[in-house]
Image: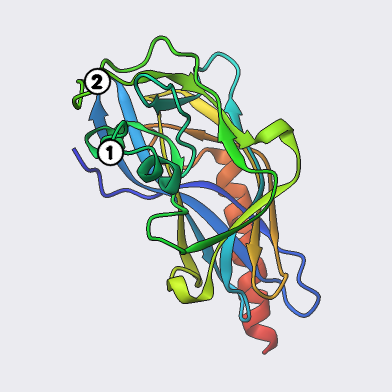
Amino acid sequence: MLRKICFALTAVLATAASANAAIIVTATNPTDVGNGLTAVTLHAHATGAGQTINGIQDPSLVAAAGSSGLHQVWTPITGAATPTRGSQTAAAPLWSDTWLPFDSYWLFGSAAGDNLSVGSAFNETNSGSGGAALPTAGFGAPTTGFGGMGTVGGAPGNMAFTLTSGKQGVDVDLAHLVGKTGQAFLSTFVITTNEGVNQTITNQSLTFGVAVPEPATLGLMGLALAGSLGFIRRR
């Protein structure tokens, strides 16, 4: 059941030279997908003038202490990883979109040519056990389990939406993430912008299925809001 509640993943101040602009990251549209799992959309919002969000750099999403991590769905037969929407569609016919609600993946590649990739490719891990039992789509059941998301070898890597994709902007959906309801993961990455006013997120925690921000997150949101209001007053 879709719960129309947005809860904050984190909010911190950007280090813009000319303004106290902030990029606020939230987990929107928490959805109970069954099997004890909750899905969210990772969303970024730029509050400052001259910030056009385009992508993610050097991601690392890992399980918090005592948690399983992100739910993953890999193809049957080949066991191919599916860290992006583009990698899912490229795995056809072994991949089936009937599994889409249960997989954690970046939204790059939702349409042909909608993104550019520089450096190490995005990848993910999958324990291959403990995940949802999903039905076959003609080639056997997919491999499900839990793991993290990052880059090959942990090396620097960036993916960004192209200008022609129409997906850059002040409000950008970045990923579809799934985990056990009530469990948490830690996220570290850089949100990139066309103007170079980037935002670093470091070891911020999201708890799947929690409808309100944790106190620490609320404090960060307050800092971001204060910076934004201060910028408005100075204009």
Q: Residue 134: which numbered mark, if any?
A: 2
Q: Residue 5: which numbered mark, if any?
A: none
Q: Please say if 156 is above or below 229.
A: above
Q: Quadrant of residue 134?
A: top left
Q: Nearer the viewer, residue 12 or 79?
A: 79
Residue 22 point in image, percent of width and height: 63, 65
Residue 89 point in image, percent of width and height: 36, 45
Q: Please say if 128 is above or below 13.
A: above
Q: Is residue 18 left or right of residue 51?
A: right
Kindly report which numbered mark, 2 or 1, lies closer to the viewer in this rendering: 2
Q: Please say if 78 is above or below 4.
A: above
Q: Which residue is mark 1?
A: 31
Residue at point 63%, 51% (across, down): 220
Disc 1 packing (10 Å; few <14; some 14–19; many ≥20)? many
Q: Nearer the viewer, residue 215 or 176?
A: 176
Disc 1 residue type (three-letter):
Thr
Q: Residue furthest bottom?
A: 235
Residue at point 71%, 69% (across, down): 197
Assign a secondary structure to mark 1. strand
Assign a secondary structure to mark 2. loop
